[in-house]
Image: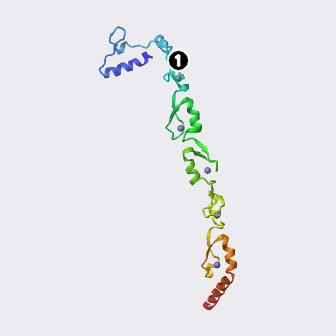
Amino acid sequence: MWAQILPALLVSLRELNVMPTCPLDNEIIKLHEVFRDNCCNREVLNLQVYCRNSPACNVKSSLGRYQDHLQQCSFESVQCTNEGCCEKVLQKDLKEHLGLLCKYRKELCQYCNQSVTSVNLKTHERTGCPDYPLICPHGCMQIILTKEVEEHFVVCCEVDIDCPYKQYGCPTKIKRGKLSEHENIYLRDHMLQILERNLQLEDQV
Ligand SMILES: [Zn+2]
Ligand SMILES: [Zn+2]
Ligand SMILES: [Zn+2]
Ligand SMILES: [Zn+2]
Ligand SMILES: [Zn+2]
């Protein structure tokens, strides 16, 4: 390994005006004297090293296998893979983070079954979910789905509507549920209003 990185190291040391020397005899090391020693390379790769996550991780592995170990080391910190999440967690906690804790995990909306990013779920329920149940805002106490609101308002007994005899002159605005009561009480008035309108029309003709 040293044989692989040493030439590059020497070049950068020279740029810094530092002369590298041998730790054994203090002789200056020259770039053209550095060569790849496969035997030494093997020896170095067999050196036993402690995991960088010690003492949490007590694994000791050869330098050659070290990268492989880090890939599986429970105590290695890894980036969450969910889009939008910047959190780093220990490898051993990643599964729980992805499935339960990550704000950017996908969850199924309990009402419409759409897959929604966890952090947006509440907003989705309140503003984007077609199947979210609401209590009618007009006070009829009926539970309606968001997608059926318009449909419901057309029949809701608590919505104010014009008396159907408005065109004949009845000015009443009344809750839909009270309309037949109004029609019964004002039957005579409505008849008179129609008659009067007819007379007016005849006069015009
Ligand atoms: Zn480890
Ligand atoms: Zn995450
Ligand atoms: Zn939904
Ligand atoms: Zn209603
Ligand atoms: Zn009326």
Tell me the SS state at disc 1: strand
Q: Quadrant of the C terminus?
A: bottom right
The residue carrying pointer 1 sits among few (fewer than 14), some (14 to 19) or many (20 or more) residues within 10 Å by Cα, namely some
Residue 89 x %, y %:
52, 32
Locate residue 181: give its quadrant. bottom right
- Give left or right: position of 170 versus 3: right
**What residue is pinned by disc 1?**
60
Q: Quadrant of ligand 4?
A: bottom right
Which residue is outermost to the top?
25
In this view, the residue in front, 112 or 90, is 90
- Give left or right: position of 100 versus 188: left
Residue at 53%, 40% in the rendered image? 83
In this view, the residue in front, 185 or 14, is 185
**Mark 1 CB near ligand 1 (8 Å cut):** no
**Residue 119 to residue 7: above or below:** below
**Residue 73 to residue 202: above or below:** above
Q: How many marks?
A: 1
Residue at 33%, 20% in the rendered image? 13
In this view, the residue in front, 1 or 105, is 105
Locate residue 193: give its quadrant. bottom right
Residue at 56%, 38% in the rendered image? 101
Q: Quadrant of the N terminus?
A: top left
Residue 2 x %, y %:
43, 16
Residue 159 x %, y %:
62, 68
Residue type for callout 1:
Lys
In this view, the residue in front, 171 or 195, is 171
Q: How is the image coloured?
A: rainbow
- Give left or right: position of 163 versus 14: right
Which residue is outermost to the left?
17
Residue 100 x %, y %:
59, 38
